[in-house]
Every structure is written in C-alpha cells, then in structure tokens.
Amino acid sequence: MATEVIELGDAEFDREVLEAKGPVLVDFTATWCPPCRFIAPILDALAVEYRGRLKVTKIDVDTHQQTAQRYGIRALPCLLVFKEGKVVRQLVGAMPRARLEQELLAQL
C-alpha cells in the first residue's frame, strides 16, 4: 500500500511546509525510535482520511538534523502542526489514534 505521508528533507522543508496553503503536520521521527514506529501507521491512515484538508509529512532527524535543530526537537516522536508557516500545535510522544485525531481536528 502506498503511503500518503510525504518524506521531507532539509532542502524541501520550507517549500513543502512553510509555503503550504493549508495545514501541515510534520512528524519528526527516526528509524531507531519504537514510539515513532508505533504512530507511523496511524499517521498513514490520517493522511489518507484527511487528504485535501491536512498535508502529512515526516522528516528523519538523524538524516536531516538542520530542520530538527531549527525547531528545537529534543524528544521523539515530535509532531508539529503548521499553519501559514507558523507552528500552531506541538505534540510529543506516541498517543492513541483517537487522541491524536482529536488534537489535529482542532487545527483544521
């Protein structure tokens, strides 16, 4: 199954996130992080369900450290919701789909 989650790097972060027309969820993640792997399928499902209303992206903090440092990412997973180029919500740690969805719906 193809994923709707867009993988980002430092080079395209500004274009894909800060210049986006609608809300963007950025999942700061790492391959070695068990809680990150736990929420990955949840984010995949939400990306499909909210297609057109919410862009869901992810960035690997080990490979793309510049962006992680820019936003002071210190714990994983860290989800930032951007609107009009600004962070409007930060969620840290794994959480059940119902709670994550509730947090995100408040931003749509």
Image (spheres, helix red, strand yellow):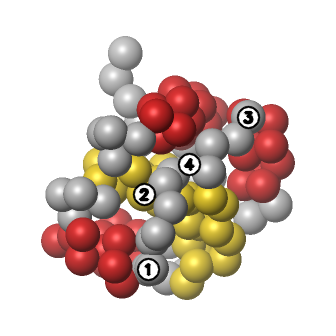
Per the model, the C-alpha gap separating discs 3 and 2 is 17 Å
* Earlier sequence position, callout 2 versus callout 4: 2
Q: Are marks 3 and 4 in contact (CB under 8 Å)?
A: no
* Earlier sequence position, callout 2 versus callout 1: 2
Identity of the residue drawn at 66% across and 60% down: 91
> Label 3: which residue?
96
Per the model, the C-alpha gap separating discs 4 and 1 is 25 Å
Q: Are marks 2 and 1 in contact (CB under 8 Å)?
A: yes
Identity of the residue drawn at 30% across and 39% down: 31
- The amino acid type of the residue labelled 1 equals Tyr
Identity of the residue drawn at 34% across and 66% down: 16
Decide which of 19, 88 is in the foreground and name it.
88
Identity of the residue drawn at 24% across and 69% down: 65
Percent across and percent down for residue 41 are: 52, 27
- The amino acid type of the residue labelled 3 equals Pro
The correct choice, above or below, for 96 with respect to 62 in the image is: above
* Earlier sequence position, callout 3 versus callout 4: 4
> Label 2: which residue?
28
* Earlier sequence position, callout 4 versus callout 1: 4
> Label 1: which residue?
71
Location of residue 80 by image quarter: bottom right
- The amino acid type of the residue labelled 4 equals Gly
Crowd rating for badge 1 (residues with CA inside 10 Å; few <14, some 14–19, many 20+):
few
Location of residue 92 by image quarter: bottom right
